[in-house]
Image (cartoon, rainbow, N blue to C red):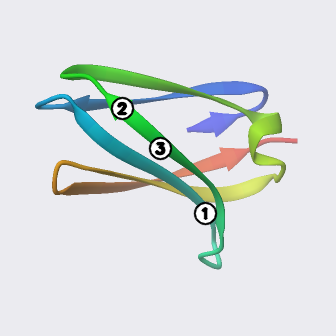
């Protein structure tokens, strides 16, 4: 995904439960961690560029219900 001002990350959970969304830079330094209470089905978290305070390539990882997924995003100046 690309973020110029705001973007959404959507994720599907088979059951309601706790999830962690971690955002980190290419060196592996954690930029921000969101503790989420997800509901069964589709979930959405909105990210503001100002919430992250950096630009360039970042990665985000979602951990929930013994599953993990990592994706890339680009923060545009």
Measured in 3D between alpha carbons, the distance from the residue under mark 2 to the one under mark 1, in whole angstroms, is 21 Å
Q: What element carries label 1?
A: strand
Q: In this view, does 61 lie to the left or right of 26?
A: left
Q: Callout 1 environment at 10 Å: few (<14), some (14 to 19), or many (20+)?
A: some
Image depth: mark 2 or mark 1 in front: 2
Q: In which quarter of the image is the C terminus?
A: top right
Measured in 3D between alpha carbons, the distance from the residue under mark 1 to the one under mark 3, in whole angstroms, is 15 Å
The residue wearing badge 3 is: 35
Q: Of the residues under marks 1 and 3, which one precedes in the sequence? A: 1
Q: Position of residue 47 (x, y in %)?
A: 64, 31
Which quadrant of the structure image shows residue 17? top left
Q: Is mark 3 on a helix, strand or loop?
A: strand
Q: Who's the residue at 12% across and 30% down the image?
A: 15
Tell which of 16 and 69 is nearer to you.
16
Name above or below for residue 59 compared with residue 9: below
Do the residues bearing badges 2 and 3 touch, measured as CB atoms within 8 Å? yes
Tell which of 66 and 28 is nearer to you.
66
């Amino acid at each position: 995904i690309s973020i110029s001002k705001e973007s959404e990350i959507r994720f599907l959970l088979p059951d309601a439960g706790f999830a962690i969304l971690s955002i980190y830079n290419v060196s592996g330094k954690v930029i921000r961690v969101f503790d989420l209470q997800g509901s069964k089905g589709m979930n959405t978290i909105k990210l503001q560029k100002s919430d992250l305070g950096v630009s360039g390539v970042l990665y985000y990882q979602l951990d929930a219900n013994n599953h993990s997924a990592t994706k890339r995003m680009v923060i545009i100046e």
